[in-house]
Amino acid sequence: MAAHTNNYPKLHNAMWPGVVGKGAPGAEPFIGLDTLLELTQNAEVDGVKFDGVDLWLADPHISIDSSKDDIKRVTDHIASYGLKVGSFVAPIWGGAGGGSAMGTKEERARFVEQVKKACKIGQWMREMGIRPTGGVRIDSSSGVGDWEKDPVGNTHKIAETFREAGKVAQDHGEYLFAEGEICWGGMQSWKKNVNLLEEVGMPGVVGYQADMAHSMLFTLGYNSEEDRLLPKDYDWKDRAALDAAYKKVADALRLWTYDFHVAQNDGTVFGSGDHEKTGRHVQATDPNGKLDIAKHAGYWLRDDAGALTKKIRHLSWDGCMFPNAVMTQQQTWNDVLGAMLKVRDAHGWVE
């Protein structure tokens, strides 16, 4: 049995892959929270288990309109699996009760209100002792095509909305991180994410969520050809070119990165159900995976000099839009845990 001495960052499994891209007409059904908690609890590699879970604050998992009593019941239930809670996904999209961050005054107000509800739940869970780390995930809740109609004006609106949401987060002792993906307007490239966060101007309060699979797609210029870093005829056998491009993305966004998803990507895009096409997540052991997970994670978890930043207190695995047949196999989560453990072995520390 290998010796795994590091105990930070903590290792979390994300619950939202049981919901994202599922439940819509023509899509696979939702996977219940209890099923995902059981699979997480049962995963084990060399005697190491998951420390916690990151949550989706939306039905059918946990309602964003939950009362404090509702949250106490959920908290006790999750604790019964021996798990802590970390980051949240706030349901800020129009179809989930929110609205576009660059939309009408009413839509933007609904966006901020959803963030407020999520922050309140976060505050309750901290008070209940189950949530030692983690903030709230957001995005622009806007499509790339709509954003392109007025790039400057729409980015300005998104930044204003994020600032208002950031003030709400501060009031509740929380912080926000926007997940840059090629499908979100104003956030579809590494440069656009930097520009947006600089315009928001709330370091320490509103930052970036780096997902290894999504951020790798930035190097290929999907939905933002002008920000492409690898040539159109790029040969995946040229590992040095990928390393250099991916490090440039991480260097630009690392300062703003407050949440981190370990993930694998095969260099393609994929959508499921009502979710727009974005970077495809593939299994940790997929032979077509383009990332060296442990190596490339270090681009985010270490600074330019190679020193650990220790900013990221827990790692999460994101398997969004995995087929249900894959997600309900215990081996999937053992493999995921094994990949995350390699990241912690390489870039973790002891407290």
Image: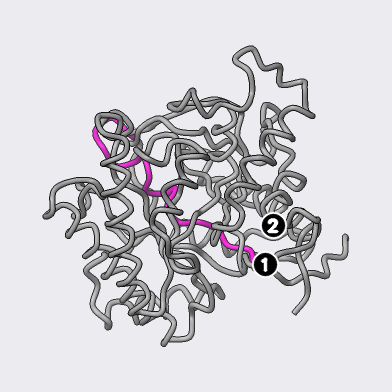
Asked whether the beta carbons under mark 1 and mark 2 sit within 8 Å of each other, the answer is yes
Q: Which residue is nearer to you in this view: 23 or 16?
A: 16
SS for dot 1: loop
| Viewer can see residue 33 | no
Q: Residue 301's mark?
A: 2
SS for dot 2: helix
Magenta residues, start to end: 10-27
Q: Which residue is nearer to you in this view: 225 or 283?
A: 225
In the rendering, at what x and y percent does residue 194 appear?
A: 49, 47
In the rendering, at what x and y percent does residue 170 appear?
A: 37, 76
Q: Residue 83's mark?
A: none
Q: Which residue is nearer to you in this view: 231 or 294?
A: 231
Q: Amino acid at mark 1?
A: Pro
Tag nearer the camera, 1 or 2:
2
Q: Amino acid at mark 2?
A: Leu
Residue 75 occupies quadrant: bottom left
| Viewer can see residue 74 | yes
Indicate the quadrant containing the C terminus: top left, top right, bottom left or bottom right: bottom right
Q: CA distance from mark 1 to mark 2?
A: 10 Å
In the rendering, at what x and y percent does residue 141 appear?
A: 29, 46
Residue 186 occupies quadrant: top left
Q: Which residue is at a point 45% across and 40% down the rendered structure image?
A: 192
Residue annotated with mark 1? 9
Q: Is residue 179 left or right of residue 315?
A: left
Indicate the quadrant containing the N terminus: top left, top right, bottom left or bottom right: bottom right
